[in-house]
């Protein structure tokens, strides 16, 4: 059910069983996909893409930029290289993604396998769905969230620019201990 349960605040009758509750949440996701005009044949792909955007973006405007980065990468057959997918594939969620995670041979590891992973890694909300379907214009191929307190993210066109963003993130991490635990 990963990715198919719409994240929202629900009020359930206490008499409902788990299956009924899950059905309501899945139906709510279907309503959202229909609201955006996503063809049923594209639901899985859309939810997979949107789930990655959901896990990678922090600020609302950045959802649309993260979506653009991943679309740009897919358009040129560049690996997505999403830390969120790699860590999901090993059953972890960590701000620091180790070489063990990046080198793990699992089907969600978009560092090892091209294209989208086999399915969603999270429950995408409305903003992630909208961003997936309507990314902003841009030529970015990289991003790094350099300030974990504010969610500020640097979007880059070149690998050299991205490396400079990583240096800024490394500096922030050194000045803000405890975020890597």
Image: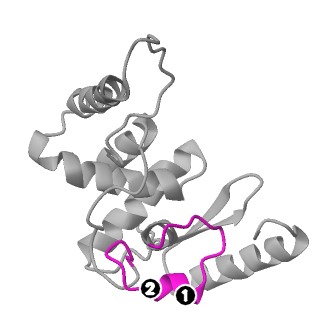
**Number of numbered labels in the structure image:** 2
User: Which residue is depicted at the point 32% across and 80% down?
Assistant: 78
Residue 104: mark in rendering: 2
Task: Reply yes or no: does residue 98 show up in magenta.
Answer: yes
Is residue 77 at all visible to an observer of this figure?
Answer: yes
- Where disc 2 sits, the SS reads loop
Compared across the picture, whether 120 is left or right of 180 comes to: left
For the record, the magenta segment spans 90-110
**Dots 1, 2 in contact, CB < 8 A:** yes
User: Which residue is depicted at the point 49% across and 50% down?
Assistant: 63
Task: Reply yes or no: does residue 5 show up in magenta.
Answer: no
Up/down of 118 relative to 1, above or below: below
Is residue 136 at all visible to an observer of this figure?
Answer: no
Q: Nearer the viewer, residue 125 or 77?
A: 125
- What quarter of the picture does the C terminus occupy? bottom right
Q: Nearer the viewer, residue 28 or 153?
A: 28
Q: Nearer the viewer, residue 127 or 96?
A: 96
Q: CA distance from mark 1 to mark 2?
A: 6 Å
Q: Quadrant of residue 120?
A: bottom left
Residue at which label 1 appears: 100
Up/down of 60 relative to 56, above or below: above
Give x and y (percent) for residue 154.
62, 66
Up/down of 63 relative to 71, above or below: above
Q: Quadrant of residue 129?
A: top left
Q: Quadrant of residue 68?
A: bottom left
Q: Nearer the viewer, residue 58 or 124?
A: 124
User: Which residue is depicted at the point 75% across and 70% down?
Assistant: 180
Give x and y (percent) for residue 53.
44, 55
State whether the magenta stretch is mostly helix, strand or loop: loop
């Amino acid at each position: 059910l990963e990715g198919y349960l719409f994240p929202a605040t629900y009020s359930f009758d206490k008499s409902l069983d788990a299956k009924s509750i899950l059905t309501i949440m899945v139906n709510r996701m279907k309503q959202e996909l229909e609201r955006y005009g996503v063809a049923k044949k594209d639901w899985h792909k859309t939810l997979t893409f949107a789930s990655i955007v959901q896990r990678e973006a922090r600020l609302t405007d950045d959802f649309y930029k993260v979506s653009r980065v991943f679309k740009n990468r897919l358009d040129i057959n560049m690996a997505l290289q999403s830390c969120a997918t790699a860590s999901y594939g090993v059953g972890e969620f960590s701000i620091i993604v180790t070489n063990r995670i990046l080198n793990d041979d699992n089907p969600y590891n978009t560092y090892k396998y091209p294209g989208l992973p086999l399915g969603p890694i999270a429950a995408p909300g409305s903003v992630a769905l909208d961003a997936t379907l309507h990314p902003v214009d841009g030529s970015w191929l990289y991003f790094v969230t350099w300030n974990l307190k504010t969610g500020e993210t640097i979007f880059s066109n070149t690998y050299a620019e991205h490396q400079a963003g990583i240096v800024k993130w490394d500096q922030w991490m050194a000045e803000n201990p405890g975020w890597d635990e």
